Amino acid sequence: MGGLAALAREAGHRVTGCDAGVYPPMSDQLRALGIDLVEGFGAEQMTLKPDMYVIGNVVSRARLPAGTPKFPLMEAILDAGTPYTSGPQWLAEHVLQGRHVLAVAGTHGKTTTTAMLTWILEFAGLQPGFLVGGVPMNFDVSARLGVSRAAVAQGRPKQGTAPSGGSAAHAVASVGAPFVIEADEYDTAFFDKRSKFVHYRPRTAILNNLEFDHADIFDNLAAIERQFHHLVRTVPSTGRVVVNGLEESLTRVLAQGCWSEVRSFGAAVNDFTAVGEPHDFEVHYQGKTVANVKWTLTGTHNQLNALAAIAAAEHVGVTPAVAARALGDFRNVKRRMEVRARVTRPGGEVTVYDDFAHHPTAIRTTLDGLRRKVGREQRILAIFEPRSNTMKLGTMKAQLPWSLEQADLAFCYTGGLDWDASDALAPMGARAQVAASIDELVAQVVSQVKPGDHLVCMSNGGFGGVHLKLLQALTTSHALSAPGAS
């Protein structure tokens, strides 16, 4: 919703927004754009008299224990008959029409892969519009409108060349200016229970991976597979579906019907494959070497993300070789293994990371990637908050010990949980601790830290400012170095 507000502002609209507890980096970005933020959902905001209310899916008709509305502003909008719409519908009607939409879907890696693909197209000179569920550090904004359709129609020189010899400009001009969007399977709004991505009508669709998530709205994996099939139904016959060949769930999605060109990646028999380590690997297309990626990212999950982005970029005329050069300059997304600080202590440095991982699989892949990078000699301390709706329900609590296998120590914040985190983490023995408050959590971590440790803070929320509190506690008597400093 923050990125959508940025697009509306860039389009010339006056934009305000309300939410509860907005936190960085999005709050900083919105204020920098001159977008007024209102705390809470009070009915008095009706005095703003906007032409349109755009409703996010956090809003509902829920009632508080006393019987009063949780979202009074929504009740006032309905009572007054004021125009309203959902975020995805507003995007479809006011931003995406006439564009070549490249949509990135999947349980994991959507934000990172969307940022990769956007940067590849930017590097190739296509000046894409984009909407990312985070802040890509190559752009420092989460959304922009991109080049106009008129400019694409006129054509511009491009770095990328399609395998057929046609230019990237020609490939895009025939179907509209490119717009890259993170395509979420979560429902659209309280009044539209379809997945958000069915609104986007992509011409290029990435199906990155698929496993059970969002237990608050989906009964089982088959229900999510059905929604992914609905996305596939919207891709035109001249479009492309880029699919992870390692995922049986996605094989079942395509088996329900697919009417577009398919490009697969991941497995040895797929179209796009990787040979080498995640930080330095060859890209093969149908057995032939077409590019080499050397970059700073870690983990096999990011290697797969790269293959997906390369395959999607090729559909708009950017060659794998150009895409690989772009990825060499890719700087990832804020809160994706972002180094917040390095603290110099006697005997070595302590590195503090911020990461968005919250699903057990995402936690595991994040820690696996870091372990491959730092080896076995340095310790990894995992500090995490089960904050997503799925994790709060306890649906995946049994997977937590598996997800934390690469951590030497794990620290879980239990605020807001209705299930026993100590019991769920019991298989880890003394390697795991739980804390009911952020201050207690910080104290536990600081008491265990040793020189050379890597502290990975994982949450899909603000995590109670744990990063700053950790840094303050760690630097009380030690010097702090900026990220990247030795």
Image (spheres, rainbow, N blue to C red):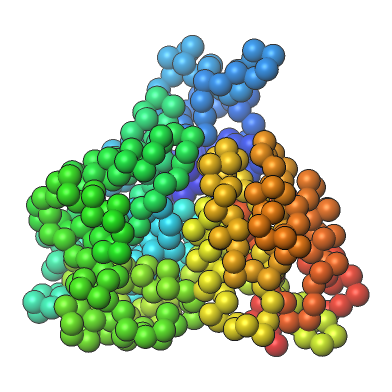
Which residue is more in the foreground, 206 or 419? 419
Q: Is residue 186 left or right of residue 155?
A: right
Q: Is residue 459 left or right of residue 167?
A: right
Q: Is residue 125 above or below residue 106?
A: below
How many numbered discs sit on the rendered protein? 0
Q: Is residue 408 above or below residue 36?
A: below
Q: Is residue 127 above or below residue 68?
A: below
Which residue is more in the foreground, 27 or 440? 440
Residue in the picture at 42% in, 46% down: 212
Q: Position of residue 454 (x, y in %)?
A: 68, 74
Q: Residue furthest right?
A: 477
Q: Position of residue 352 (x, y in %)?
A: 69, 70
Residue 389, located in which quarter of the rendered image? Answer: top right
- Report the quarter where the C terminus lies: bottom right
Residue 124 visible here: no
Residue 415, located in which quarter of the rendered image? Answer: top right
Residue in the picture at 83% in, 81% down: 345
Residue 259 visible here: yes
Q: Position of residue 119 (x, y in %)?
A: 38, 70
Q: Position of residue 236 (x, y in %)?
A: 13, 49
Residue 301, located in which quarter of the rendered image? Answer: bottom left
Residue in the picture at 50% in, 46% down: 2
Residue in the picture at 48% in, 70% down: 332
Which residue is more in the foreground, 280 or 266? 266
